[in-house]
Image: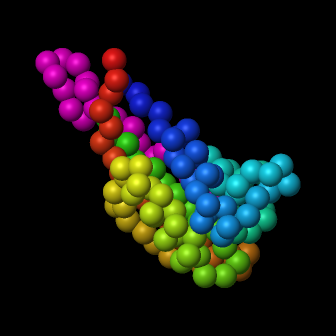
Amino acid sequence: MLIDLEPVILSALRNDTEIIALLGKDSKGTTKVYPLAAPDISLPRVTFFELTNFDNNYAGDKAVSSAIHFHIDVWHNSNPSKVSLAVNRVMESIGFVRSGTQSLYESDTKIYHRVLRYKKTQLGVD
């Protein structure tokens, strides 16, 4: 069973008032949260993608839930902590558990980069 949570995450992050205040909006009026890749390089911004999505619980021979993992990148020209904390709050509010983080500095572009990883077991709906 394949469960698509990308629209849920996108909506939750783009519609959060704190994230809107921290990131701002792009030239199209969209909060700067994007699946896979951002349309431009303006900072700060958030990108995310699904890492894995696999069946993990069965009733008889039928999958009843999926284990789903997402990778979120926070890109900032200074400290990304406020954005990262807001993203974490939103992800936890929709049932995800943080499974790891990593703070990076991209020296060639002088961009601060925080990696956040989340996991969730989602029951399927027939």
- Residue drawn at x 34%, y 47% is 120
Most distant residue in the front direction: 17
Please determine whether, in this image, residue 91 is positioned above or below residue 105. above
From the image, give the main secondary structure of the stretch colored magenta: strand
- Residue drawn at x 74%, y 68% is 43
Q: Quadrant of the C terminus?
A: top left
Residue 51 on image: x %, y %: 45, 47
Residue 21 on image: x %, y %: 67, 67
Q: Nearer the viewer, residue 104 or 42?
A: 42
- Residue drawn at x 45%, y 64% is 88
Q: Is residue 49 visible?
A: no
Residue 63 on image: x %, y %: 25, 24
Q: Quadrant of the N terminus?
A: top left
Please determine whether, in this image, residue 61 is positioned above or below residue 115. above
Tell me where the magenta segment starts and ends, as one range.
46-65
Q: Nearer the viewer, residue 86 or 68?
A: 86
Q: Nearer the viewer, residue 15 or 58?
A: 15
Within the magenta stretch, is there residue 42? no
Residue 24 on image: x %, y %: 73, 64
Most distant residue in the right direction: 27
The colouring scheme, among rainbow, by chain, secondary structure or one colour, is rainbow
Q: Is residue 35 visible?
A: yes
Tally of marks: 0
Please determine whether, in this image, residue 14 is positioned above or below residue 66. below
Horizontally, is 67 left or right of 13 in the view? left
Within the magenta stretch, is there residue 64? yes
Most distant residue in the left direction: 60
- Residue drawn at x 57%, y 70% is 83
